[in-house]
């Protein structure tokens, strides 16, 4: 049986949920083989085994954490040449895509980004133009490289050996052009990551100020959700840019998206239109976002949200 | 500094964007074209760097004839000149082919820094900066929310899920920018008038030394098998808050088993 390579996403030793989604997907096409770049493979081995990884190729050298994209692409290219896998799966995150793009050139292969589904014949489903068109696409040349949108697949456990196999990769100088000298973690850690979260609570212009975003955070925390923000809110400096949901920000597809004080300009909708369930709270009944709502409340968010938080508390303590 | 900003013309997001039934490519003709939003930030950053360090900003656009409008708009922001890679043979190119074609031109015109937006609003692959860096054999300084150039050294803050990474490299390099990086300037009237006279060099595949067999839909590495319009979302339940909006919202969440 051919291998399917899965590029593991991990931060500070924690395996990100999307890795388990990719492993679940990989099992449909071949024997899942994780490619782990950087430190922490030993500690992650059991978790990777829980989701079916047969092998874990380890590129442990610090170079893999110290340089942007290039070294990972080289390690993957060496494996593609040596093992002729059926496919390579990566997370469709900014970093995952960069590695995929470089790998595509190195191996002369096609690459598909933001796949939300993949069938047995490796035909990918993509949802484009804010979800209005669904496309089936496939790679015609080389080893298919598919970047899969986080939250598209439900991870399913299945035991695998997760045998650690060290990789001996000589990283070229060309791969080491961009050196990471420091990683700066913003204070707002601790909540689920925006593109991985099953619930996202986003605030927009209606929130009114940076201080009042605390209310959005409180609602998010009551649901164990990630916090997002509209462009209006990040442009105004009320919330950091990396939390922006929209055309020039992140695309999210959670189980539940709560849009609070957001009008729903198409720029924003492009980033959240394929959420499974959408709830809207806005005092303007004409706000375009109500067109997307499965449930909407026309009202002042400063009245509705505190009451909602209280009610959630009651349900969760029953 | 010799700065080249890669600018893509894309269909306006506000318009109804479609795929052509004949060949599943994006219909660029029947909708208004605009400069890809993140490329405006790339142009702005190019102009700021040229203002700070001296040098020229050249726009490089690969696109059909109508992309010329977007090139003029970019010039009116203050860029010095432009190169328009224009050839029917390029139609339907995927990201591998686009990066090949652009790299061929960039190799010929030379650069200290290539700047682009991190992602386009039409294809949204976000692959080009990495692919250009790979093909040109220069550092990939992507997802930058802040840039500093100091002689031959370039340093950026690279946006991450948890904050940012500080990344450094030596020029020449490829730089892609995210929205946080700056506020693009509006063209002045003077800039708009001056843009009409700025040189735009048009290159065909032959002019650029691009192998026709390596670009265009027929030789793309990926293909669309089929596509379909998705039915619009059904309208849901909208209630007016009469002192109980939060209660009703919670009831909905409970019924959907979110709480």
Image: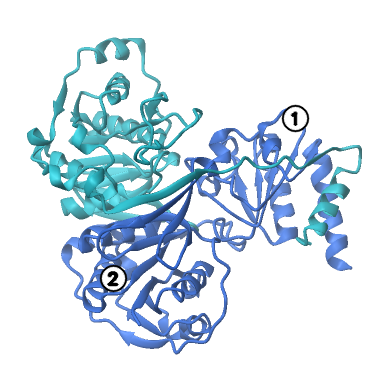
Vertically, is B219 above or below B191? below
Say which residue appears at 35% left-offset and 82% top-offset: A1
Q: Which of A134 and B111 is in front in this view?
A: A134
Say which residue appears at 61% left-offset and 56% top-offset: A254
Vertically, is A20 above or below B200? below
Q: Which mark is residue A235?
A: none
Chain that is cyan in the image: B
Q: Quadrant of the C terminus of chain B?
A: bottom right
Vertically, is A43 above or below B86? below
The quarter of the displayed image where residue B176 is located: top left
Say which residue appears at 81% left-offset and 36% top-offset: A299
Mark 2 highlights which residue?
A76
Q: How crowded is mark 1: few (under 14 residues within 10 Å), some or many (20 or more)?
A: some
User: Residue A271 placed where, x, y %?
Assistant: 54, 44
For label 2, the SS is: helix
For label 1, the SS is: loop
- Answer with left or right where residue B220 lies relative to residue B240: left
Q: Residues within 10 Å of mark 2 (few under 14, many from 20)?
A: many
Mark 1 highlights which residue?
A284
Q: In which quarter of the image is the N terminus of chain B?
A: top left
| Colour of the chain lettered A | blue
């Amino acid at each position: 049986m051919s291998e399917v390579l899965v590029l593991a996403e991990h931060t500070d030793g924690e395996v990100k949920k999307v890795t388990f989604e990719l492993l679940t997907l990989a099992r449909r096409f071949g024997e899942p083989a994780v490619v782990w770049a950087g430190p922490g493979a030993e500690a992650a081995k059991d978790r990777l085994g829980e989701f079916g990884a047969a092998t874990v190729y380890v590129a442990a050298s610090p170079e893999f954490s110290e340089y942007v994209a290039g070294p990972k692409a080289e390690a993957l290219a060496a494996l593609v040449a040596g093992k002729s896998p059926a496919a390579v799966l990566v997370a469709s995150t900014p970093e995952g895509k960069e590695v995929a793009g470089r790998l595509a050139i190195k191996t002369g292969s096609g690459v598909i980004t933001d796949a939300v589904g993949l069938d047995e014949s490796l035909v990918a489903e993509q949802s484009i133009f804010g979800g209005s068109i669904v496309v089936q696409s496939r790679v015609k040349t080389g080893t298919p490289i598919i970047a899969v949108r986080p939250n598209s697949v439900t991870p399913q456990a299945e035991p695998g050996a997760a045998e650690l196999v060290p990789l001996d990769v000589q990283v070229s100088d060309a791969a080491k052009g961009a050196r990471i000298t420091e990683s700066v973690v913003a204070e707002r850690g601790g909540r689920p990551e925006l593109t991985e979260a099953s619930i996202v609570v986003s605030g927009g212009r209606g929130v009114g100020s940076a201080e009042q975003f605390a209310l959005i955070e409180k609602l998010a925390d009551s649901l164990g959700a990630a916090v997002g923000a509209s462009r209006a809110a990040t442009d105004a400096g009320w919330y950091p840019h990396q939390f922006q949901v929209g055309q020039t920000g992140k695309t999210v597809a959670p189980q539940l998206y709560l849009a609070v004080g957001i009008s729903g300009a198409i720029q924003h909708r492009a980033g959240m239109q394929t959420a499974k369930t959408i709830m809207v709270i806005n005092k303007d009944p004409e706000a375009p976002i109500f067109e997307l709502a499965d449930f909407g409340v026309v009202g002042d968010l400063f009245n509705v949200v505190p009451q909602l938080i209280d009610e959630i508390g009651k349900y969760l303590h029953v | 500094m010799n700065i080249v900003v890669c600018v893509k013309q894309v269909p306006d997001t506000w318009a109804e964007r479609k795929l052509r039934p004949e060949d599943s490519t994006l219909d660029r003709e029947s909708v208004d074209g605009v400069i890809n939003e993140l490329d405006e930030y790339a142009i702005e950053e190019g102009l700021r760097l040229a203002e700070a360090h001296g040098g020229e900003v050249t726009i490089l656009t690969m696109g059909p004839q109508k992309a010329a409008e977007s090139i003029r708009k970019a010039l009116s922001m203050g860029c010095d000149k432009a190169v328009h890679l224009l050839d029917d043979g390029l139609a339907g190119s995927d990201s591998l082919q686009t990066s090949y074609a652009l790299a061929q031109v960039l190799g010929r015109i030379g650069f200290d820094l290539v700047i682009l937006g991190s992602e386009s609003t039409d294809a949204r692959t976000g692959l080009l900066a990495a692919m250009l860096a790979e093909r040109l054999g220069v550092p990939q300084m992507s997802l930058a929310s802040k840039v500093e150039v100091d002689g031959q050294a370039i340093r950026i803050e690279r946006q991450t899920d948890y904050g940012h990474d500080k990344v450094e490299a030596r020029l020449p390099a490829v730089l892609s920018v995210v929205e946080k990086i700056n506020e693009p300037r509006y063209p002045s009237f003077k800039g708009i008038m001056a843009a009409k006279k700025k040189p735009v060099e048009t290159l065909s595949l032959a002019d650029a030394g691009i192998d026709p067999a390596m670009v265009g839909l027929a030789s793309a590495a990926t293909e669309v098998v089929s596509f379909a319009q998705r039915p619009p979302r059904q309208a849901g339940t909208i209630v007016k808050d009469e002192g109980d909006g939060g209660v009703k919202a919670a009831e909905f969440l409970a019924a959907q088993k979110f709480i």
